[in-house]
Image (cartoon, grey):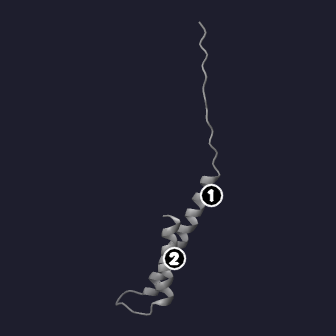
Amino acid sequence: MGIGVSVFLLAVGGILAFAVSDRLSGVDLTMVGYILMGAGALGLVITMFLISQRSNTTHREVREHRHYEE
């Protein structure tokens, strides 16, 4: 899950949790909003962690030289 999807989930979850007052039978839209916001926040934290890990890696080039003497 990338940053864009996480922000999208946060936005949709916030809209459902705080702006929608309609009721569906058997579905609590406020709870669905909170769940989407939690998933978006968790995805954002995981994405940021993975990005920070990726930037801390070092790349090394190893060259092996063999000298043949006859």
Badge 1 amino acid: Ser
Tell me the element at label 1.
Answer: helix
Count of numbered circles on the image? 2
Q: With 35 as the anchor, is 52 left or right in this view?
A: right
Q: Mark 2 is on which residue type?
A: Leu
With respect to residue 39, does 47 lie above or below?
above
Q: Residue at x 47, y 77 (%)?
A: 36
Which residue in the protein does label 2 denote?
A: 10
Classify 51 as above or below 38. above
Give the SS element for disc 2. helix
- The disc placed on residue 33 is none
Few, some or many residues within 10 Å of mark 1 (<14, 14–19, 20+)? few
The residue under the point 56% across, 64% down is: 46
Question: In the image, residue 50 lies at what x, y percent?
Answer: 57, 58
Name the N-terminal-most of marks 2 and 1. 2
Q: What residue sits right under mark 1 in the picture?
A: 52
Could you tell me which residue is drawn at 39 percent across and 92 percent down? 23
**Residue 40 image position (x, y, % from top left):** 51, 72
